Amino acid sequence: MHVLLSLFMISSIVASKPDPQAKKLMDKVHNVYEKANTLDITFKYEQSNSDIVGLTKKGQLISKGPMFKLLLDEIEIYSDGKIQYTYLKKNKEVQITEPDDKENKYHPKHIAEIYQSGTHEYSITKKIKEGGNVLIVVEFKPTDKSDPVSNIKLFISEKTNQIEKVQWFERTGDKTLVTFLKSQFNKSFDDASFTLDTKTLKDIHVEDLRD
Protein backbone atom coordinates (compact mmCIF):
# COMPACT_ATOMS: atom_id res chain seq x y z
CA MET A 1 0.00 0.00 0.00
CA HIS A 2 2.80 2.41 0.92
CA VAL A 3 4.54 1.60 -2.38
CA LEU A 4 1.38 2.44 -4.32
CA LEU A 5 0.90 5.77 -2.55
CA SER A 6 4.59 6.69 -2.93
CA LEU A 7 4.34 6.30 -6.69
CA PHE A 8 2.48 9.61 -6.79
CA MET A 9 5.17 11.57 -4.97
CA ILE A 10 7.20 14.18 -6.87
CA SER A 11 10.93 13.82 -6.34
CA SER A 12 13.02 16.94 -7.10
CA ILE A 13 12.72 20.09 -9.20
CA VAL A 14 14.84 20.01 -12.36
CA ALA A 15 14.19 22.18 -15.40
CA SER A 16 13.17 20.34 -18.58
CA LYS A 17 11.95 21.48 -21.97
CA PRO A 18 8.41 20.28 -22.75
CA ASP A 19 6.97 19.14 -26.06
CA PRO A 20 4.82 22.14 -27.15
CA GLN A 21 1.90 19.95 -28.28
CA ALA A 22 2.06 17.89 -25.10
CA LYS A 23 2.13 21.04 -22.97
CA LYS A 24 -0.90 22.43 -24.82
CA LEU A 25 -2.78 19.21 -24.12
CA MET A 26 -1.71 19.06 -20.47
CA ASP A 27 -2.85 22.66 -19.97
CA LYS A 28 -6.32 21.56 -21.10
CA VAL A 29 -6.23 18.50 -18.85
CA HIS A 30 -5.16 20.51 -15.83
CA ASN A 31 -7.91 23.06 -16.47
CA VAL A 32 -10.57 20.32 -16.43
CA TYR A 33 -9.72 19.37 -12.85
CA GLU A 34 -8.67 22.80 -11.63
CA LYS A 35 -12.09 24.32 -12.28
CA ALA A 36 -14.06 21.48 -10.67
CA ASN A 37 -15.60 22.37 -7.30
CA THR A 38 -15.97 18.72 -6.32
CA LEU A 39 -14.97 15.43 -7.87
CA ASP A 40 -16.20 11.90 -7.19
CA ILE A 41 -14.08 9.18 -8.81
CA THR A 42 -14.45 5.42 -8.82
CA PHE A 43 -11.24 3.71 -9.90
CA LYS A 44 -9.43 0.41 -10.01
CA TYR A 45 -5.73 -0.17 -9.59
CA GLU A 46 -3.67 -3.12 -10.70
CA GLN A 47 -0.18 -3.97 -9.50
CA SER A 48 2.08 -6.52 -11.13
CA ASN A 49 5.66 -7.72 -10.90
CA SER A 50 7.57 -10.97 -11.34
CA ASP A 51 5.75 -12.48 -8.34
CA ILE A 52 2.28 -10.95 -8.63
CA VAL A 53 0.33 -10.71 -11.88
CA GLY A 54 -2.93 -8.81 -12.19
CA LEU A 55 -3.71 -8.04 -8.55
CA THR A 56 -6.67 -5.69 -9.07
CA LYS A 57 -8.56 -3.70 -6.44
CA LYS A 58 -11.10 -0.89 -6.51
CA GLY A 59 -11.36 2.41 -4.67
CA GLN A 60 -13.16 5.73 -4.50
CA LEU A 61 -11.89 9.28 -4.18
CA ILE A 62 -14.12 12.23 -3.28
CA SER A 63 -12.71 15.75 -3.09
CA LYS A 64 -14.00 19.24 -2.34
CA GLY A 65 -11.42 22.01 -2.35
CA PRO A 66 -8.68 21.01 0.13
CA MET A 67 -10.92 18.31 1.63
CA PHE A 68 -10.86 14.72 0.43
CA LYS A 69 -11.90 11.18 1.25
CA LEU A 70 -10.01 8.17 -0.10
CA LEU A 71 -11.63 4.76 0.31
CA LEU A 72 -9.64 1.59 -0.34
CA ASP A 73 -9.98 -2.02 0.78
CA GLU A 74 -7.24 -1.79 3.40
CA ILE A 75 -7.32 1.87 4.33
CA GLU A 76 -9.61 4.90 4.47
CA ILE A 77 -8.32 8.47 4.66
CA TYR A 78 -10.50 11.45 5.62
CA SER A 79 -9.27 15.03 5.58
CA ASP A 80 -11.33 18.17 6.18
CA GLY A 81 -8.34 20.41 5.49
CA LYS A 82 -7.62 20.78 9.22
CA ILE A 83 -7.45 17.24 10.58
CA GLN A 84 -6.65 14.00 8.79
CA TYR A 85 -7.90 10.58 9.88
CA THR A 86 -6.25 7.43 8.54
CA TYR A 87 -8.23 4.29 9.29
CA LEU A 88 -6.09 1.15 9.05
CA LYS A 89 -8.77 -1.51 8.89
CA LYS A 90 -6.61 -4.60 9.33
CA ASN A 91 -4.87 -3.10 12.37
CA LYS A 92 -8.13 -1.72 13.77
CA GLU A 93 -6.39 1.61 14.27
CA VAL A 94 -7.13 5.25 13.46
CA GLN A 95 -4.24 7.70 13.22
CA ILE A 96 -4.98 11.40 13.60
CA THR A 97 -2.49 13.74 11.93
CA GLU A 98 -2.15 17.14 10.31
CA PRO A 99 -3.45 17.16 6.70
CA ASP A 100 -1.00 15.66 4.25
CA ASP A 101 -1.86 16.39 0.63
CA LYS A 102 0.66 13.76 -0.47
CA GLU A 103 -1.84 11.12 0.59
CA ASN A 104 -4.27 12.46 -2.01
CA LYS A 105 -2.27 11.29 -5.01
CA TYR A 106 -5.10 9.37 -6.61
CA HIS A 107 -6.56 12.73 -7.57
CA PRO A 108 -6.09 13.26 -11.33
CA LYS A 109 -5.52 16.95 -10.65
CA HIS A 110 -2.31 16.09 -8.80
CA ILE A 111 -1.32 13.61 -11.48
CA ALA A 112 -1.87 16.27 -14.15
CA GLU A 113 0.35 18.69 -12.22
CA ILE A 114 3.44 16.54 -12.84
CA TYR A 115 3.97 18.43 -16.09
CA GLN A 116 4.32 21.69 -14.14
CA SER A 117 6.91 20.35 -11.70
CA GLY A 118 9.90 20.49 -14.05
CA THR A 119 10.96 17.01 -12.89
CA HIS A 120 10.01 15.20 -16.10
CA GLU A 121 10.48 15.36 -19.83
CA TYR A 122 7.23 14.52 -21.57
CA SER A 123 5.78 14.10 -25.04
CA ILE A 124 2.79 12.71 -26.91
CA THR A 125 3.75 9.23 -28.12
CA LYS A 126 0.63 7.88 -29.84
CA LYS A 127 -3.14 7.63 -30.05
CA ILE A 128 -5.09 4.45 -29.35
CA LYS A 129 -8.73 3.40 -29.50
CA GLU A 130 -10.45 1.74 -26.55
CA GLY A 131 -14.18 1.05 -26.47
CA GLY A 132 -14.92 3.67 -29.09
CA ASN A 133 -12.90 6.28 -27.21
CA VAL A 134 -9.73 7.80 -28.67
CA LEU A 135 -6.99 8.12 -26.06
CA ILE A 136 -3.89 10.28 -26.39
CA VAL A 137 -0.87 8.78 -24.65
CA VAL A 138 1.50 11.24 -22.96
CA GLU A 139 4.71 9.72 -21.65
CA PHE A 140 6.70 11.24 -18.77
CA LYS A 141 10.32 10.35 -18.01
CA PRO A 142 12.12 11.74 -14.94
CA THR A 143 15.21 13.85 -15.50
CA ASP A 144 16.60 12.42 -12.27
CA LYS A 145 17.83 8.96 -13.23
CA SER A 146 17.80 7.89 -9.59
CA ASP A 147 14.01 8.28 -9.48
CA PRO A 148 12.57 4.83 -8.69
CA VAL A 149 9.81 5.40 -11.28
CA SER A 150 11.34 5.27 -14.76
CA ASN A 151 8.24 6.03 -16.80
CA ILE A 152 4.70 7.36 -16.36
CA LYS A 153 2.04 7.13 -19.04
CA LEU A 154 -1.17 9.17 -19.03
CA PHE A 155 -4.04 8.02 -21.24
CA ILE A 156 -6.14 11.10 -21.99
CA SER A 157 -9.54 11.20 -23.67
CA GLU A 158 -9.32 13.18 -26.89
CA LYS A 159 -12.98 14.15 -26.49
CA THR A 160 -13.10 15.30 -22.86
CA ASN A 161 -9.43 15.98 -21.97
CA GLN A 162 -9.95 13.82 -18.88
CA ILE A 163 -7.38 11.29 -17.67
CA GLU A 164 -8.76 7.80 -18.27
CA LYS A 165 -5.76 5.76 -17.09
CA VAL A 166 -2.32 6.22 -15.54
CA GLN A 167 0.48 3.68 -15.65
CA TRP A 168 3.72 3.72 -13.63
CA PHE A 169 6.82 1.68 -14.44
CA GLU A 170 9.38 1.21 -11.68
CA ARG A 171 13.04 0.44 -12.31
CA THR A 172 12.57 -2.75 -10.28
CA GLY A 173 10.15 -4.04 -12.90
CA ASP A 174 7.03 -3.37 -10.84
CA LYS A 175 4.10 -1.84 -12.71
CA THR A 176 0.96 -0.09 -11.48
CA LEU A 177 -2.08 0.76 -13.58
CA VAL A 178 -4.85 3.03 -12.27
CA THR A 179 -8.03 3.24 -14.35
CA PHE A 180 -10.65 5.89 -13.62
CA LEU A 181 -13.93 4.04 -14.12
CA LYS A 182 -16.31 6.92 -13.45
CA SER A 183 -15.71 10.62 -12.83
CA GLN A 184 -18.51 12.89 -11.60
CA PHE A 185 -17.93 16.62 -11.34
CA ASN A 186 -19.54 19.24 -9.09
CA LYS A 187 -21.77 16.97 -7.01
CA SER A 188 -22.94 18.28 -3.64
CA PHE A 189 -21.06 17.01 -0.57
CA ASP A 190 -21.50 18.09 3.04
CA ASP A 191 -18.26 19.08 4.77
CA ALA A 192 -19.02 16.54 7.51
CA SER A 193 -18.51 13.72 5.02
CA PHE A 194 -14.77 14.46 5.04
CA THR A 195 -14.36 13.72 8.75
CA LEU A 196 -14.35 10.38 10.57
CA ASP A 197 -16.40 9.89 13.71
CA THR A 198 -14.24 7.37 15.54
CA LYS A 199 -17.03 6.74 18.05
CA THR A 200 -18.93 4.84 15.37
CA LEU A 201 -16.09 2.30 15.03
CA LYS A 202 -15.97 -0.61 17.47
CA ASP A 203 -12.85 -2.10 19.06
CA ILE A 204 -10.36 0.28 17.48
CA HIS A 205 -7.31 2.08 18.82
CA VAL A 206 -7.14 5.83 18.19
CA GLU A 207 -3.69 7.44 18.15
CA ASP A 208 -3.28 11.21 17.92
CA LEU A 209 0.06 11.88 16.20
CA ARG A 210 -0.29 15.66 15.98
CA ASP A 211 2.30 17.87 17.65
Image: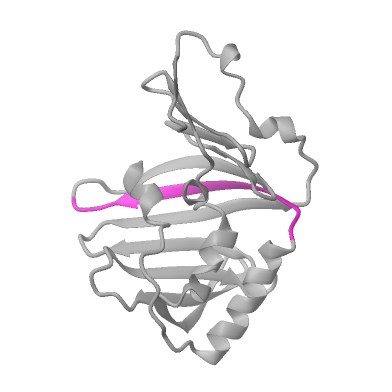
Is residue 158 part of the magenta span, yes or no? no
**Coloring scheme of the render?**
one colour
Identify the residue at image location x=55%, y=67%.
112
Quadrant location of the C terminus? Answer: top left
Residue appearing at x 65%, y 48% in the figure: 66
Instruction: Count how many numbered circles sit on residues in the image.
Output: 0
Residue 210 to residue 18: above or below: above
Q: Position of residue 200 (x, y in %)?
A: 60, 13
**Residue 161 in view in this figure:** no
Residue in the image at 26% along x and 56% along y? 174
Q: Position of residue 47 (x, y in %)?
A: 34, 50
* Residue positioned most to the top: 203
Q: Which residues, given as a range, are shown in magenta?
A: 36-50
Is residue 184 visible in the rendered structure shown here? yes
User: 170 above or below 81?
Assistant: below
Q: Residue at coordinates 48% horizontally, 77% vertically from top-left?
A: 138
Majority secondary structure of the magenta segment?
strand
The quadrant the N terminus occupies is: top left
